[in-house]
Protein backbone atom coordinates (compact mmCIF):
# COMPACT_ATOMS: atom_id res chain seq x y z
CA UNK A 1 0.00 0.00 0.00
CA UNK A 2 2.80 2.45 0.91
CA UNK A 3 4.64 1.73 -2.37
CA UNK A 4 1.46 2.31 -4.35
CA UNK A 5 0.86 5.57 -2.48
CA UNK A 6 4.41 6.70 -3.23
CA UNK A 7 4.05 5.91 -6.95
CA UNK A 8 0.76 7.78 -7.14
CA UNK A 9 2.28 10.75 -5.34
CA UNK A 10 5.32 10.85 -7.60
CA UNK A 11 2.99 10.89 -10.60
CA UNK A 12 0.94 13.72 -9.13
CA UNK A 13 -2.18 11.53 -9.21
CA UNK A 14 -4.64 12.37 -6.45
CA UNK A 15 -6.15 8.89 -6.04
CA UNK A 16 -6.78 6.85 -2.89
CA UNK A 17 -4.68 3.64 -3.24
CA UNK A 18 -7.65 1.72 -1.80
CA UNK A 19 -10.07 2.97 -4.47
CA UNK A 20 -11.55 0.47 -6.93
CA UNK A 21 -10.19 0.96 -10.44
CA UNK A 22 -13.64 0.77 -12.06
CA UNK A 23 -14.69 3.77 -9.98
CA UNK A 24 -11.94 5.97 -11.44
CA UNK A 25 -12.25 8.18 -14.50
CA UNK A 26 -10.99 6.88 -17.85
CA UNK A 27 -7.98 9.21 -17.67
CA UNK A 28 -7.07 8.10 -14.14
CA UNK A 29 -7.27 4.45 -15.18
CA UNK A 30 -4.95 5.19 -18.07
CA UNK A 31 -2.42 6.77 -15.73
CA UNK A 32 -2.63 3.74 -13.42
CA UNK A 33 -1.77 1.45 -16.34
CA UNK A 34 1.20 3.63 -17.23
CA UNK A 35 2.42 3.57 -13.62
CA UNK A 36 2.16 -0.22 -13.54
CA UNK A 37 4.34 -0.47 -16.63
CA UNK A 38 6.88 2.06 -15.37
CA UNK A 39 7.19 0.35 -11.97
CA UNK A 40 8.22 -2.99 -13.49
CA UNK A 41 11.79 -3.94 -14.36
CA UNK A 42 11.21 -4.07 -18.09
CA UNK A 43 13.66 -4.09 -20.99
CA UNK A 44 11.07 -3.06 -23.58
CA UNK A 45 8.13 -0.78 -22.86
CA UNK A 46 5.29 -0.34 -25.38
CA UNK A 47 3.06 2.69 -24.82
CA UNK A 48 -0.07 2.82 -26.98
CA UNK A 49 -1.73 6.27 -27.00
CA UNK A 50 -0.55 6.89 -23.41
CA UNK A 51 -1.51 10.58 -23.32
CA UNK A 52 -4.96 10.40 -24.91
CA UNK A 53 -6.65 11.51 -21.67
CA UNK A 54 -3.78 13.25 -19.88
CA UNK A 55 -3.37 16.96 -19.28
CA UNK A 56 -0.27 18.83 -20.43
CA UNK A 57 1.30 18.60 -16.95
CA UNK A 58 0.59 14.86 -16.73
CA UNK A 59 2.06 14.40 -20.21
CA UNK A 60 5.23 16.25 -19.18
CA UNK A 61 5.59 13.95 -16.16
CA UNK A 62 5.15 10.87 -18.37
CA UNK A 63 7.79 12.13 -20.81
CA UNK A 64 10.22 12.66 -17.92
CA UNK A 65 9.65 9.07 -16.81
CA UNK A 66 10.12 7.74 -20.33
CA UNK A 67 13.36 9.68 -20.78
CA UNK A 68 14.66 8.34 -17.46
CA UNK A 69 13.86 4.78 -18.51
CA UNK A 70 15.63 5.36 -21.81
CA UNK A 71 18.74 6.56 -19.98
CA UNK A 72 18.63 3.31 -17.97
CA UNK A 73 18.75 1.31 -21.20
CA UNK A 74 15.05 0.49 -21.59
CA UNK A 75 13.83 0.48 -25.19
CA UNK A 76 10.51 2.27 -25.71
CA UNK A 77 8.01 1.89 -28.55
CA UNK A 78 5.69 4.89 -28.42
CA UNK A 79 2.49 4.58 -30.44
CA UNK A 80 0.50 7.77 -30.94
CA UNK A 81 -1.49 9.83 -33.42
CA UNK A 82 -0.15 13.06 -31.94
CA UNK A 83 2.74 14.05 -34.15
CA UNK A 84 3.93 16.82 -31.85
CA UNK A 85 4.60 14.19 -29.17
CA UNK A 86 6.60 12.07 -31.61
CA UNK A 87 8.89 14.99 -32.43
CA UNK A 88 9.27 15.79 -28.73
CA UNK A 89 9.96 12.34 -27.27
CA UNK A 90 11.21 10.01 -30.02
CA UNK A 91 14.62 9.36 -31.56
CA UNK A 92 13.28 7.68 -34.68
CA UNK A 93 9.87 7.69 -36.34
CA UNK A 94 8.12 4.97 -38.31
CA UNK A 95 4.80 5.67 -40.07
CA UNK A 96 2.46 2.82 -40.99
CA UNK A 97 -0.22 3.06 -43.68
CA UNK A 98 -2.53 0.18 -44.57
CA UNK A 99 -0.46 -2.25 -42.53
CA UNK A 100 2.87 -1.43 -44.20
CA UNK A 101 5.80 0.81 -43.36
CA UNK A 102 5.37 4.00 -45.36
CA UNK A 103 8.21 5.98 -43.79
CA UNK A 104 11.04 5.45 -41.34
CA UNK A 105 13.76 7.91 -40.38
CA UNK A 106 15.52 9.61 -37.50
CA UNK A 107 13.58 12.50 -35.99
CA UNK A 108 16.51 14.86 -36.62
CA UNK A 109 16.19 14.12 -40.33
CA UNK A 110 12.38 14.36 -40.46
CA UNK A 111 9.93 17.25 -40.65
CA UNK A 112 6.33 17.69 -39.51
CA UNK A 113 5.31 18.59 -43.07
CA UNK A 114 6.77 15.38 -44.44
CA UNK A 115 5.10 13.26 -41.73
CA UNK A 116 1.68 14.84 -42.32
CA UNK A 117 1.98 14.21 -46.07
CA UNK A 118 2.89 10.53 -45.56
CA UNK A 119 0.08 9.91 -43.07
CA UNK A 120 -2.54 11.64 -45.22
CA UNK A 121 -1.28 9.86 -48.32
CA UNK A 122 -1.31 13.12 -50.28
CA UNK A 123 1.07 16.00 -50.84
CA UNK A 124 0.79 18.48 -47.99
CA UNK A 125 1.70 22.10 -47.54
CA UNK A 126 1.05 21.91 -43.82
CA UNK A 127 3.81 23.20 -41.58
CA UNK A 128 2.57 21.04 -38.74
CA UNK A 129 1.26 23.96 -36.72
CA UNK A 130 -2.25 24.19 -35.38
CA UNK A 131 -4.69 25.68 -37.86
CA UNK A 132 -7.07 28.08 -36.18
CA UNK A 133 -10.42 29.34 -37.39
CA UNK A 134 -12.32 32.43 -36.33
CA UNK A 135 -16.07 32.36 -36.80
CA UNK A 136 -18.18 35.46 -36.79
CA UNK A 137 -19.61 36.32 -33.38
CA UNK A 138 -23.19 35.12 -32.70
CA UNK A 139 -25.92 37.69 -33.17
CA UNK A 140 -26.36 39.43 -29.83
CA UNK A 141 -30.13 39.40 -30.35
CA UNK A 142 -30.36 35.64 -30.69
CA UNK A 143 -31.10 33.68 -27.49
CA UNK A 144 -28.43 31.19 -26.40
CA UNK A 145 -28.84 27.63 -27.61
CA UNK A 146 -27.84 26.33 -24.16
CA UNK A 147 -27.85 28.10 -20.81
CA UNK A 148 -26.88 26.74 -17.41
CA UNK A 149 -27.87 28.90 -14.44
CA UNK A 150 -26.25 27.87 -11.13
CA UNK A 151 -26.57 24.19 -12.03
CA UNK A 152 -25.50 21.80 -9.30
CA UNK A 153 -25.29 18.02 -9.66
CA UNK A 154 -22.98 15.22 -8.55
CA UNK A 155 -19.41 16.63 -8.94
CA UNK A 156 -20.83 19.84 -10.48
CA UNK A 157 -21.38 23.01 -8.44
CA UNK A 158 -23.23 26.22 -9.35
CA UNK A 159 -22.19 26.12 -13.02
CA UNK A 160 -23.19 29.04 -15.23
CA UNK A 161 -22.41 28.94 -18.94
CA UNK A 162 -23.98 29.42 -22.32
CA UNK A 163 -23.50 28.25 -25.89
CA UNK A 164 -24.89 30.11 -28.90
CA UNK A 165 -25.74 28.82 -32.34
CA UNK A 166 -22.77 28.97 -34.64
CA UNK A 167 -20.09 28.76 -31.96
CA UNK A 168 -17.89 26.12 -30.35
CA UNK A 169 -17.22 26.48 -26.64
CA UNK A 170 -14.42 24.62 -24.87
CA UNK A 171 -14.29 23.34 -21.29
CA UNK A 172 -10.65 23.52 -20.13
CA UNK A 173 -9.29 21.94 -17.00
CA UNK A 174 -7.17 19.20 -15.54
CA UNK A 175 -8.31 15.61 -15.51
CA UNK A 176 -10.88 15.23 -12.76
CA UNK A 177 -11.75 18.93 -12.77
CA UNK A 178 -15.40 18.25 -13.63
CA UNK A 179 -15.32 18.87 -17.39
CA UNK A 180 -16.90 15.55 -18.32
CA UNK A 181 -19.37 15.77 -15.45
CA UNK A 182 -20.73 19.05 -16.85
CA UNK A 183 -21.40 17.40 -20.21
CA UNK A 184 -23.05 14.42 -18.51
CA UNK A 185 -25.28 16.74 -16.50
CA UNK A 186 -26.43 18.59 -19.62
CA UNK A 187 -27.17 15.26 -21.35
CA UNK A 188 -29.22 13.81 -18.50
CA UNK A 189 -26.66 11.28 -17.29
CA UNK A 190 -26.45 13.11 -13.95
CA UNK A 191 -29.48 14.41 -12.11
CA UNK A 192 -29.70 18.18 -11.71
CA UNK A 193 -30.05 18.90 -7.99
CA UNK A 194 -30.58 22.65 -8.31
CA UNK A 195 -30.37 25.41 -10.88
CA UNK A 196 -31.81 25.67 -14.38
CA UNK A 197 -30.92 24.12 -17.74
CA UNK A 198 -32.42 26.03 -20.68
CA UNK A 199 -32.30 24.64 -24.23
CA UNK A 200 -33.50 26.81 -27.11
CA UNK A 201 -35.08 29.18 -24.62
CA UNK A 202 -37.13 26.43 -22.95
CA UNK A 203 -36.40 25.14 -19.41
CA UNK A 204 -35.34 21.49 -19.60
CA UNK A 205 -34.96 18.78 -16.99
CA UNK A 206 -33.60 15.70 -18.75
CA UNK A 207 -34.10 12.57 -16.65
CA UNK A 208 -32.38 10.31 -19.18
CA UNK A 209 -30.30 10.66 -22.38
CA UNK A 210 -33.35 9.87 -24.52
CA UNK A 211 -34.96 13.11 -23.32
CA UNK A 212 -31.85 15.06 -24.35
CA UNK A 213 -31.74 13.39 -27.78
CA UNK A 214 -35.38 14.29 -28.46
CA UNK A 215 -34.55 17.89 -27.52
CA UNK A 216 -31.83 17.98 -30.19
CA UNK A 217 -28.69 17.15 -28.20
CA UNK A 218 -26.03 14.68 -29.30
CA UNK A 219 -23.18 13.28 -27.19
CA UNK A 220 -19.81 11.85 -28.22
CA UNK A 221 -18.56 10.31 -24.93
CA UNK A 222 -14.99 10.13 -23.67
CA UNK A 223 -14.54 6.35 -23.64
CA UNK A 224 -15.53 5.06 -27.06
CA UNK A 225 -15.34 1.34 -26.30
CA UNK A 226 -17.28 1.43 -23.05
CA UNK A 227 -19.77 4.19 -23.77
CA UNK A 228 -20.28 4.58 -27.51
CA UNK A 229 -19.95 1.36 -29.52
CA UNK A 230 -20.72 -2.34 -29.37
CA UNK A 231 -17.65 -3.90 -30.94
CA UNK A 232 -19.34 -7.23 -31.71
CA UNK A 233 -22.10 -5.55 -33.71
CA UNK A 234 -21.90 -4.34 -37.29
CA UNK A 235 -21.14 -0.83 -38.48
CA UNK A 236 -24.81 -0.52 -39.47
CA UNK A 237 -26.09 -1.50 -36.02
CA UNK A 238 -23.65 0.88 -34.32
CA UNK A 239 -24.65 3.69 -36.64
CA UNK A 240 -28.31 3.04 -35.78
CA UNK A 241 -27.86 3.11 -31.99
CA UNK A 242 -29.02 6.71 -31.43
CA UNK A 243 -31.97 6.24 -33.83
CA UNK A 244 -33.27 2.77 -33.01
CA UNK A 245 -36.83 4.08 -32.67
CA UNK A 246 -36.87 5.23 -36.30
CA UNK A 247 -35.12 2.09 -37.55
CA UNK A 248 -37.42 -0.47 -35.93
CA UNK A 249 -40.92 -1.62 -36.72
CA UNK A 250 -42.96 -3.69 -34.26
CA UNK A 251 -39.75 -4.70 -32.49
CA UNK A 252 -37.94 -5.72 -35.71
CA UNK A 253 -34.70 -4.02 -36.70
CA UNK A 254 -34.86 -2.62 -40.25
CA UNK A 255 -31.55 -3.90 -41.57
CA UNK A 256 -31.82 -2.45 -45.07
CA UNK A 257 -32.70 1.04 -43.86
CA UNK A 258 -29.94 0.90 -41.26
CA UNK A 259 -27.42 -0.24 -43.88
CA UNK A 260 -28.34 2.67 -46.17
CA UNK A 261 -27.90 5.18 -43.36
CA UNK A 262 -24.61 3.57 -42.36
CA UNK A 263 -23.34 3.68 -45.96
CA UNK A 264 -24.14 7.39 -46.06
CA UNK A 265 -21.97 7.93 -42.95
CA UNK A 266 -19.21 5.71 -44.38
CA UNK A 267 -19.14 7.68 -47.63
CA UNK A 268 -19.42 11.11 -46.07
CA UNK A 269 -16.72 10.54 -43.46
CA UNK A 270 -14.51 8.34 -45.65
CA UNK A 271 -14.60 5.45 -43.20
CA UNK A 272 -12.30 2.63 -44.26
CA UNK A 273 -14.49 -0.47 -44.06
CA UNK A 274 -15.58 -3.20 -46.52
CA UNK A 275 -19.20 -2.30 -45.89
CA UNK A 276 -21.95 -1.52 -43.37
CA UNK A 277 -22.26 -5.14 -42.22
CA UNK A 278 -18.60 -5.33 -41.18
CA UNK A 279 -18.09 -5.89 -37.41
CA UNK A 280 -17.16 -2.68 -35.63
CA UNK A 281 -14.24 -4.50 -33.98
CA UNK A 282 -12.47 -4.78 -37.35
CA UNK A 283 -12.23 -0.99 -37.79
CA UNK A 284 -9.32 1.09 -36.57
CA UNK A 285 -9.88 3.43 -33.64
CA UNK A 286 -10.01 6.44 -35.94
CA UNK A 287 -12.64 4.88 -38.18
CA UNK A 288 -14.69 3.84 -35.15
CA UNK A 289 -14.61 7.44 -33.95
CA UNK A 290 -15.78 8.66 -37.36
CA UNK A 291 -18.81 6.36 -37.03
CA UNK A 292 -19.57 7.67 -33.53
CA UNK A 293 -19.48 11.28 -34.74
CA UNK A 294 -21.01 10.65 -38.16
CA UNK A 295 -24.08 8.84 -36.84
CA UNK A 296 -25.19 12.11 -35.22
CA UNK A 297 -25.49 13.79 -38.62
CA UNK A 298 -28.90 12.40 -39.62
CA UNK A 299 -30.71 14.26 -38.25
CA UNK A 300 -28.17 16.84 -37.14
CA UNK A 301 -28.39 17.72 -33.41
CA UNK A 302 -28.71 21.41 -32.63
CA UNK A 303 -26.17 21.01 -29.81
CA UNK A 304 -23.12 18.74 -29.94
CA UNK A 305 -21.54 17.62 -26.65
CA UNK A 306 -18.06 16.36 -27.53
CA UNK A 307 -15.80 14.67 -24.97
CA UNK A 308 -12.28 14.06 -26.35
CA UNK A 309 -13.65 13.92 -29.93
CA UNK A 310 -10.37 12.97 -31.63
CA UNK A 311 -8.89 10.58 -29.07
CA UNK A 312 -6.88 7.84 -30.81
CA UNK A 313 -7.35 9.42 -34.25
CA UNK A 314 -4.58 10.07 -36.78
CA UNK A 315 -3.86 13.51 -38.20
CA UNK A 316 -5.80 12.95 -41.43
CA UNK A 317 -8.93 11.64 -39.69
CA UNK A 318 -8.64 14.38 -37.08
CA UNK A 319 -8.86 17.10 -39.72
CA UNK A 320 -11.89 15.35 -41.25
CA UNK A 321 -13.59 15.32 -37.83
CA UNK A 322 -12.75 18.99 -37.29
CA UNK A 323 -14.22 19.73 -40.72
CA UNK A 324 -17.44 17.86 -39.89
CA UNK A 325 -17.84 19.75 -36.60
CA UNK A 326 -17.11 23.07 -38.30
CA UNK A 327 -19.69 22.28 -40.99
CA UNK A 328 -22.36 21.42 -38.40
CA UNK A 329 -21.72 24.67 -36.56
CA UNK A 330 -21.77 26.64 -39.81
CA UNK A 331 -25.26 25.25 -40.41
CA UNK A 332 -26.42 26.70 -37.10
CA UNK A 333 -25.57 24.06 -34.50
CA UNK A 334 -23.55 24.78 -31.36
CA UNK A 335 -20.91 22.65 -29.67
CA UNK A 336 -19.58 22.22 -26.14
CA UNK A 337 -16.19 20.49 -26.21
CA UNK A 338 -13.98 18.78 -23.63
CA UNK A 339 -10.40 17.97 -24.60
CA UNK A 340 -7.12 17.37 -22.79
CA UNK A 341 -5.28 18.73 -25.84
CA UNK A 342 -4.93 22.51 -25.50
CA UNK A 343 -3.85 22.80 -29.14
CA UNK A 344 -7.06 21.07 -30.18
CA UNK A 345 -9.18 23.35 -28.00
CA UNK A 346 -7.48 26.44 -29.39
CA UNK A 347 -7.92 25.21 -32.94
CA UNK A 348 -11.61 24.40 -32.53
CA UNK A 349 -13.17 26.82 -30.07
CA UNK A 350 -14.42 30.40 -30.11
CA UNK A 351 -14.73 30.73 -26.32
CA UNK A 352 -13.37 28.86 -23.32
CA UNK A 353 -14.53 28.18 -19.77
CA UNK A 354 -11.93 27.15 -17.18
CA UNK A 355 -13.19 24.33 -14.93
CA UNK A 356 -11.85 23.42 -11.50
CA UNK A 357 -13.53 21.25 -8.84
CA UNK A 358 -16.76 21.17 -10.82
CA UNK A 359 -17.04 24.95 -11.00
CA UNK A 360 -16.50 27.54 -13.73
CA UNK A 361 -13.67 29.74 -12.49
CA UNK A 362 -12.69 31.67 -15.62
CA UNK A 363 -13.70 32.54 -19.16
CA UNK A 364 -11.87 33.77 -22.27
CA UNK A 365 -12.47 34.37 -25.96
CA UNK A 366 -10.08 33.18 -28.63
CA UNK A 367 -9.53 36.79 -29.64
CA UNK A 368 -8.29 37.56 -26.10
CA UNK A 369 -5.48 34.97 -26.03
CA UNK A 370 -2.46 34.26 -28.22
CA UNK A 371 -2.43 30.46 -28.33
CA UNK A 372 -2.75 27.14 -26.55
CA UNK A 373 0.00 28.11 -24.08
CA UNK A 374 -2.26 30.82 -22.70
CA UNK A 375 -5.00 28.22 -22.13
CA UNK A 376 -2.51 25.97 -20.37
CA UNK A 377 -1.38 28.80 -18.09
CA UNK A 378 -4.98 29.72 -17.24
CA UNK A 379 -5.69 26.14 -16.18
CA UNK A 380 -2.45 25.98 -14.18
CA UNK A 381 -3.28 29.21 -12.33
CA UNK A 382 -6.74 27.90 -11.56
CA UNK A 383 -5.39 24.59 -10.19
CA UNK A 384 -2.78 26.42 -8.11
CA UNK A 385 -5.47 28.37 -6.25
CA UNK A 386 -7.62 25.37 -5.33
Image (cartoon, grey):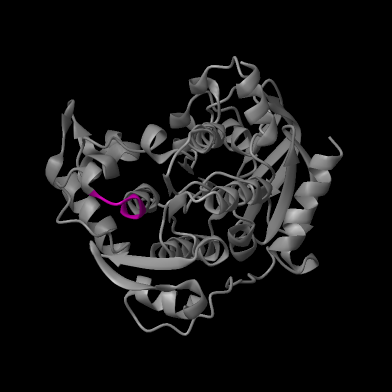
* Above or below, 303 relative to 317: above
Q: Does 285 appear in magenta?
A: yes
**Residue sitting nearer the eye, 282 or 219:** 282
Relative side of 256 to 78, left or right? left
Where is residue 168 shown, x and y percent of the image? 61, 57
Magenta segment, which residues? Answer: 283-287
**Residue sitting nearer the eye, 53 or 327:** 53
Where is residue 360 shown, x and y percent of the image? 77, 40
* Above or below, 72 relative to 6: below
| The quadrant where residue 290 appears | bottom left
Seen as rendered, the residue at the extreme right is: 385
* Above or below, 86 relative to 150: below
The residue located at (32%, 76%) in the rendering is 121
Q: Does 188 appear in magenta?
A: no
Q: Quadrant of the N terminus?
A: top right
- Quick check: can you spot residue 124? yes
Provide the major secondary structure of the magenta segment. helix
The residue located at (25%, 50%) in the rendering is 283
Relative side of 167 to 234, left or right? right
- Quick check: can you spot residue 177? no
Where is residue 257 shown, x and y percent of the image? 17, 46
Q: Quadrant of the C terminus?
A: top right
Where is residue 175 shown, x and y percent of the image? 64, 39
The residue located at (72%, 64%) in the rendering is 366
**Residue sitting nearer the eye, 322 or 45:** 45
| The quadrant where residue 373 appears | bottom right
Amino acid sequence: MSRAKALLGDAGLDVDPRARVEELSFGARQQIEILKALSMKVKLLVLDEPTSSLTADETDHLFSSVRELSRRGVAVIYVTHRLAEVFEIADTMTILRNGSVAYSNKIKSSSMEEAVAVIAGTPSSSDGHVVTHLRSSPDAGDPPLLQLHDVTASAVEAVCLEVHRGEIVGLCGQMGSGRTEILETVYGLRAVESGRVIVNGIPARFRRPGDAMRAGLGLVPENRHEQAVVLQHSVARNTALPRLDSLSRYGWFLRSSAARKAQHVVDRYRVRTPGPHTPMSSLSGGNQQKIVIGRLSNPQPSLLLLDEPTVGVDVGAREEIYGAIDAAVARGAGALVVSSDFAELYRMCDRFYIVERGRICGEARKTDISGEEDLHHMVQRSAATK
